[in-house]
Image (cartoon, helix red, strand yellow):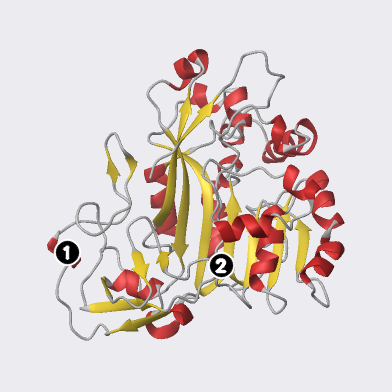
Amino acid sequence: RTLLCSLLVTWSLPTIHSNPTTMAAAGMSEAKTFEVVQDYYGKVLSTSKDLKTSACTSCDKPPHHVLEAIKRVPREVDEKFYGCGAPLPSGVEGLRVLDLGSGSGRDCYVMSAFVGESGSVVGIDMTDEQLDVARAHVDSYTKTLGYSKPNMSFIKGNIEFLDKAGLKDGEFNIIVSNCVVNLSPDKERVINEAYRVLAPGGEFYFSDVYCDRRLPAEVQAHEVLFGECIAGALYNEDFKRLARKAGFTDPRFLTISSIEVTDPELKEVVGEANFYSITYRLFKLPGLLETLCEDYGQYAVYKGTIPGHKHVYHLDDHHRFEKGKPVLVCGNTAAMVGEQGMCWLAKHFEVVGDRSVHYGIYGNVPGRTCGTIDAGTGPAGGGCGDGGCC
């Protein structure tokens, strides 16, 4: 499903700093790049209402159980939230969660409720003003949830350097992030670090802004478009290349929303480039994911145990699991929903069959991979029939 989110921008805006993705190439130091982002999101913006476009706010309405959880989040935390999706998985009780670029902490507060008292949530951000807001309400929210002690903490640091923040290899089961990676001056390092700190069977579940082409330098350096999360958008195919290189062999996307630039002058700047808010799911399943979707005659059955998904669960844009109904899957999808018990989703699914017998490429379509681009429709999910994986 594609939703249109209009960018209603005028040229009478206050000055917004340039895109950190191109600053280093233009001679600006990495330290200066981080300073620019801190200044905009810490000082220029007071609340999400100060944003001039919808690119850095959620375009799609979150599911009911997420909306109910958001209602319990302290008002100040929610008002200072900036994001382009709802990367908030449920069914994560007892798991360890990291939020990259946590900002005011809204997604951390929601995940704090989802993981329960036995789980934990860590938010990392480099902006003092945002961290102050996030930390200010931890104790009161802990009482709201009825926990005996906080299960949520916030640390200062850069998402490119999780090692410098003291985060260890394999420390987390889930990583979330909401419209932050596009602001990074080193997106490849962000993805590599995410892979490092994930435990085997873990997942990087996040929303961000992408483009259907590599943007020219003049677009990347545009002040207004940078501040509104457009100029830093990564070409979707380049993102998938970086993800696979890091170890996330089979990137899947869950939701996609088109972002339409309607202002005539800004439209002239971006030209024919198309932008999307996409929620991606990147699984760390070493030894189980292959570059193509292979058929081993396996099927999976959803148990209906994930909160908010009693009757049906969507793994990605093309895998819909109805409770109790066997669904044929390729080897990669079998791994994602729990083959060998490695993935965090394993307790919610039953996977039948192993890899002892190989029946060739899944769906009999040689050369297909997940996440292909269909001209005119944006990033396609790869899936049963046309597009790629099972």
Give, as a three-letter code, the residue at label 2: Ser
Q: How far apart are marks 1 and 2 (CA)?
A: 30 Å
User: Is residue 295 in sight in this rendering?
Assistant: yes
- Checking the image for residue 106, the label placed there is none
Left-right relation of 10 to 357: right
- Checking the image for residue 90, the label placed there is 2
Which residue corresponds to the image point at 63% horizontal and 67% vertical from the top-left? 97
Residue 78 at x, y percent in the picture: 73, 48
Q: In which quarter of the image is the N terminus?
A: top left
Mark whose residue sits in front, 1 or 2: 2
Dot 1 corresponds to which residue? Answer: 363
Give above or below for 276 relative to 26: below
Residue 70 at x, y percent in the picture: 68, 55
Residue 317 at x, y percent in the picture: 36, 55
Secondary structure at numbered mark 1? helix
Q: Quadrant location of residue 247?
A: bottom left
Which residue corresponds to the image point at 23% horizontal and 60% vertical from the top-left? 384
Instruction: Mark 2: give few (<14), some (14-19) or many (20+) Cα within 10 Å.
Output: some
